[in-house]
Amino acid sequence: MKIKLNNMRIRALAFILGALFVSFIWVYVSYLIPIGSVDGENIYKYEAMQRINMDNAVKSIGKDKAFDTAMKKLGITVSDSELTNEYNSVVEKYGGTDELKSIMIDTQSNITMLKSSIKKGMLKQKAIEKLAKDEKATNDDLTAFFEKYKENYPGEFKENEEKIKSDYLMMKGAERYDEYIKSYEDAVQIRIY
């Protein structure tokens, strides 16, 4: 089949191709332009635009990327089903989707940011639990911990020994977690363009 091209068809084709080219350039400039980098990995404008406080967006994304790297190194993950279950629990806790959306409007948040925050909290908790497993507790450690936080434990030391030990190890895990994350945040290289 032969296609006959006349002057009108050539103009229409040129117009369509020109419009596509201009659209591509507009999208690239508007959203895909790098605005910074973290450890050599670009941060794009569309990532920063998802943040409320644009002044700190690059630094915030940098900390998030450092957090993600730290969790990967620890082998910590959260599945989509775990995240969905936790999100649904939060929705229920706050009285349903409409009430939660109202709260998010008041706090200048959105569902994407909420789910990201929930996921980060879940990853942090799993990391603390993992780091706590490597900790040891002597009787002196547990006794001192009990004396310091006695108001949290009804009764005597022996009655609460397992809970005291669990809480002590989680506290130590949280301390190790803070040091671990800080080492990643301190090592990250952030450049703002």
Image (cartoon, rainbow, N blue to C red):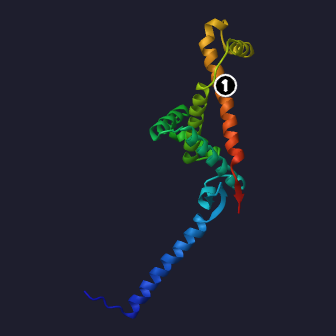
Q: Is residue 39 above or below residue 179?
A: below
Q: What residue is shown at x 64% (from left), y 46% (from top)?
A: 66
Label 1 packing within 10 angstroms: few (<14), some (14-19), many (20+): some
In the rendered view, tell whether residue 189 sits above or below residue 184: below
Q: Provide the secondary structure element on which disc 1 rests.
A: helix
Identity of the residue drawn at 61% across and 60% down? 44
Q: Is residue 145 left or right of residue 129?
A: right
Q: Quadrant of residue 147?
A: top right
As rendered, which of 128 and 139 lies closer to the eye?
139
The image quadrant of residue 38 is bottom right
Q: Quadrant of the C terminus?
A: bottom right
Which residue ends up furthest to the bottom in the rendered image? Answer: 7
Residue 68 in sight from this viewpoint: yes
Q: Nearer the viewer, residue 167 or 17?
A: 167
Q: Residue 41: where, in percent of width, then height?
A: 61, 57
Q: Would residue 101 be seen by someone viewing this image from the given angle? A: no
Rendered-image quadrant of the N terminus: bottom left
Is 154 displayed left or right of 17 in the figure? right
**Residue 27 quadrant:** bottom right
Q: Which residue is mark 1?
A: 171
Three-letter amino acid code of the residue under disc 1: Met
Query: Which residue lies at the image location 55% right of the left edge and 40% below the top edge?
Result: 119
| Residue 93 location (% of width, % of height) | 54, 31
Which residue is found at the position 35% from the left and 91% from the top? 5
Q: Is residue 170 left or right of residue 5?
A: right
Residue 8 image point, x, y percent: 40, 91
